[in-house]
Image: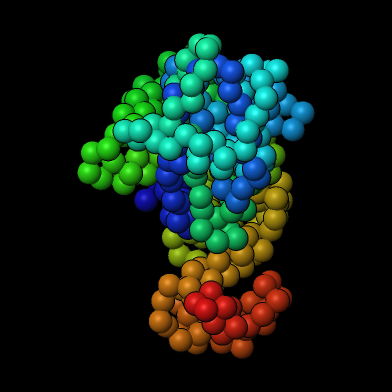
């Protein structure tokens, strides 16, 4: 398994469509802040995206992803009034899978969806990506695989065929990977984070090792040796590109695995501690309490209540 796949395996990504639209101007929708990443595919027509102080024009054939989960608005014109998304969905129930908003102006087609990642670690990984990614027509023209996915997504989003929602969800997850591939090829390294780490081949290999075998008692020395670097240079580069020391990154990764096993499995806490790399159950209890303010057993009870 190559590094990007190894890192993504820990996100437990869930993709979905929340609306396909046919809208005639004037129109505007207000989307609240959310614990996931939103994306919008402008299949036909044009619109404006307003996110805080940023205003971005969207043309037909363009894609925008808001990894920051920030509140934003989509408008047929900069002066259009907006309606909360929840109210629009109620006012305009879907017909053959598509929400229709009538008006006297030009028609636009829009597909809106989301990328959600399970747990604190997954959400932090989403938030570690650029807050807004705009893929214009020229860039998408050079990405045939991504364009093919968007075409398929548009078809499934407006379909009432059996399994359409499941097919759309799987397409959105593949779309997420394609967007990440595009970001990895960008020359601008951007802020520190796991994506910046994957751009550096030696750090990508270290991340691959950590995610593939998080229970191993990794030391900075061993990781540095495995990727062909000195301990000091490796530790400095990891901190610079990823934003935290290797040991802290591994600790966060292990605790996220613990929360997932507590939610989804029936293993005892001692078994979980051993499986993810803690020397003892008491060691896991101390680390878990420091991070989450409660014991693993209390966390398990609260998530299953």
Q: Is residue 58 above or below residue 160?
A: above
Residue 164 placement: quadrant: top left
Residue 98 placement: quadrant: top left
Compared across the picture, whether 155 is left or right of 288 comes to left
Q: Residue 88 location in percent, x, y?
A: 54, 36
Q: Is residue 185 visible?
A: no
Q: Residue 203 location in percent, x, y?
A: 57, 48
The residue furthest left is: 162
Question: Which residue is pictured at 47% across the width and 34% down the height?
Answer: 92
Question: Which residue is pictured at 42% across the width and 83% down the height?
Answer: 267
Question: Which residue is pictured at 56% across the width and 42% down the height?
Answer: 86
Q: Residue 102 location in percent, x, y?
A: 48, 21
Colour scheme in use: rainbow
Q: Is residue 282 above or below residue 122?
A: below
Q: Is residue 294 above or below residue 50?
A: below
Question: Which residue is pictured at 43% across the width and 37% down the height?
Answer: 93
Q: Nearer the viewer, residue 85 or 44?
A: 85
């Amino acid at each position: 398994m190559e590094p990007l796949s190894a890192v993504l395996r820990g996100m437990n990504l869930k993709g979905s469509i929340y609306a396909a639209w046919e809208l005639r101007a004037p129109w505007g929708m207000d989307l609240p802040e959310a614990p996931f990443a939103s994306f919008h595919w402008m299949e036909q027509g044009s619109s404006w995206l307003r996110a805080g102080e940023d205003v971005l024009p969207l043309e037909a054939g363009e894609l925008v992803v808001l990894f920051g989960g920030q509140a934003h608005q989509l408008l047929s014109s900069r002066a259009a009034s907006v309606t909360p998304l929840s109210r629009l969905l109620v006012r305009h129930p879907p017909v053959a899978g598509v929400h229709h908003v009538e008006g006297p102006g030009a028609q636009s087609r829009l597909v809106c969806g989301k990328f959600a990642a399970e747990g604190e670690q997954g959400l932090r990984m989403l938030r570690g990506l650029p807050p807004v990614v705009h893929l214009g027509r020229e860039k998408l023209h050079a990405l045939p695989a991504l364009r093919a996915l968007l075409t398929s997504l548009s078809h499934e989003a407006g379909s009432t065929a059996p399994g359409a929602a499941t097919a759309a969800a799987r397409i959105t997850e593949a779309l997420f990977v394609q967007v990440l591939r595009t970001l990895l090829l960008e020359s601008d390294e951007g802020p520190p984070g796991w994506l910046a780490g994957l751009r550096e081949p030696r750090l990508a290999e270290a991340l691959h090792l950590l995610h593939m075998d998080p229970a191993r008692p990794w030391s900075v020395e061993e990781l540095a040796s495995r990727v062909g670097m000195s301990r000091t240079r490796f530790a400095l580069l990891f901190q610079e590109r990823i934003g935290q020391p290797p040991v802290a990154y591994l600790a966060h990764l292990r605790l996220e695995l613990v929360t997932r096993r507590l939610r989804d499995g029936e293993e005892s806490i001692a078994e979980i501690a051993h499986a993810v790399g803690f020397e003892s159950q008491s060691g896991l209890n101390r680390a878990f309490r420091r991070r989450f303010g409660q014991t693993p057993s209390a966390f398990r009870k609260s998530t299953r209540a």
